[in-house]
Image (cartoon, grey):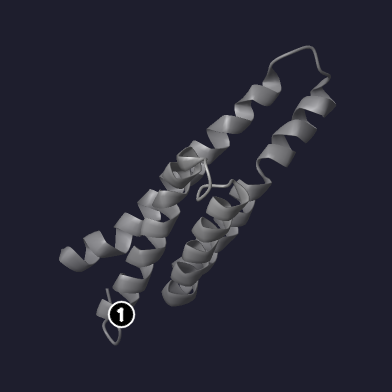
Amino acid sequence: MKNRLLYWTPRVIAIMAILFMMIFSLDCFEGSYTIGERLTCFVMHNIPSFLVVLILIAAWKWELAGGILFLLAALTGSILFRGFSGNPASLIVMAPFAVAGILFIIHNRFSAGKQD
């Protein structure tokens, strides 16, 4: 049971954090823009989310590599959004990805040689 909890927790955290990031792109559907402009805006706003989905897919198959990629994504996002120099809110948005990365690595280390 404990191993199943450690298996699913990083995946659920990552999915919820991705959905949270995607919520911010819904502002593209306000205003008097054409449907093409709205869809372009929506896709452009979700490029980081799509990249994190690719990381999640990799982490689902290769936990150690995915965990490292999640940690790098959290660090990169924090740097790009100036989390370490005056924008602490970006650290709050990036923290779930760091936690998911750490949990992927922990699960990979504890389940080495075992089957779920």
* Image quarter (top left, top right, bottom left or bottom right) of the N terminus: bottom left
Viewed as shown, does residue 20 lie left or right of 7?
right
Residue under the point 63% across and 49% down? 48
Image vertical order of residue 63 relative to residue 32, above or below: below
Task: In the displayed orientation, state which residue is furthest to the front.
Answer: 85
Residue under the point 45% across and 45% down? 17
Q: Where is residue 108 in the image (x, y as percent from the top left)?
A: 34, 76
Viewed as shown, does residue 77 lie left or right of 111?
right
Viewed as shown, does residue 32 lie left or right of 105?
right
Where does label 1 land, which residue? 109
Q: Position of residue 107 (x, y in %)?
A: 30, 71
Residue 10's quadrant in the figure?
bottom left
Residue under the point 44% across and 48% down? 15
* Image quarter (top left, top right, bottom left or bottom right) of the C terminus: bottom left
Residue under the point 29% across and 87% down? 113
Q: What element carries label 1?
A: helix
Q: Can residue 111 be seen in this view?
A: no
Amino acid type indicated by mark 1:
Arg
